[in-house]
Image: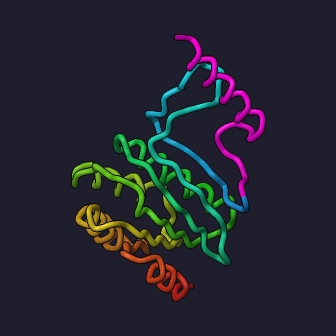
Amino acid sequence: PYLPILAALMLSIITSTMFGGLGFMLSGFTTSAIGENSLPVLFKNVCTFLMAISYSSKVEGDILFVKASGFESGIQDVIDYGSAVYKEAVSCGIKKILCDEIDLKYKLGLKDTYKLINSTAENMDKDFKLAIVTNEINYLEATFFEHILLERGYSVNFFKSIEKARDWLKLLK
């Protein structure tokens, strides 16, 4: 019964030693994993976590390109993900963000989407431009999110293709 625990511990030590914890550079991409509901796999001091939302990112010209995957396990996961992406853009001096969320599964309803809108409005400057590519399943909440933030003066747009999202961002100053 202890063999799986020992194997996981060894893997976590190797991963933590080689990559310095949860975030590491890989071929020009920064890989991160976030989520309030992240669960420690083994012990308190081991840096291996099961994350709900993970993403990789890289700067392409004046755009921070983000590729997200996984699933959200609540509104706080989505707020944490958005906050981490925003902070990364700020630290890079980037004002345009393209999030490819086609592989990200959302369960948020309209009530939680409204909470997310308020959190975004409280924490994001209006001079940022945000293009999000999402799948059909998430489109009702996405258009609600977009409409309310546009009404509040933010530059946010949802797309069904990365090319259209990138073209929209390139048109903006």
For this view, does 20 lie left or right of residue 64? right
For this view, does 25 lie left or right of residue 136? right
At horizontal 67% and vertical 29% (from top left) the residue drawn is: 11
Residue 9 sits in quarter: top right
At horizontal 36% and vertical 75% (from top left) the residue drawn is: 160
Q: Position of residue 84 (x, y in %)?
A: 55, 51
Query: Of 15 and 51, which appears nearest the observer?
Result: 15
Q: Position of residue 35 (x, y in %)?
A: 48, 40
Q: Main secondary structure of the magenta part?
A: helix
161 drawn magenta: no
At horizontal 34% and vertical 41% (from top left) the residue drawn is: 74
User: How many numbered dots are placed on residues in this image?
Assistant: 0
Q: Is residue 14 above or below residue 27?
A: above
Q: Position of residue 148 (x, y in %)?
A: 29, 67
Q: Is residue 22 above or below residue 91?
A: above
Q: Going by the picture, which residue comes out furthest to the right?
A: 18
Q: Which residues are magenta?
A: 1-26
Q: Going by the picture, which residue comes out furthest to the top?
A: 1
Q: Is residue 3 above or below residue 20?
A: above
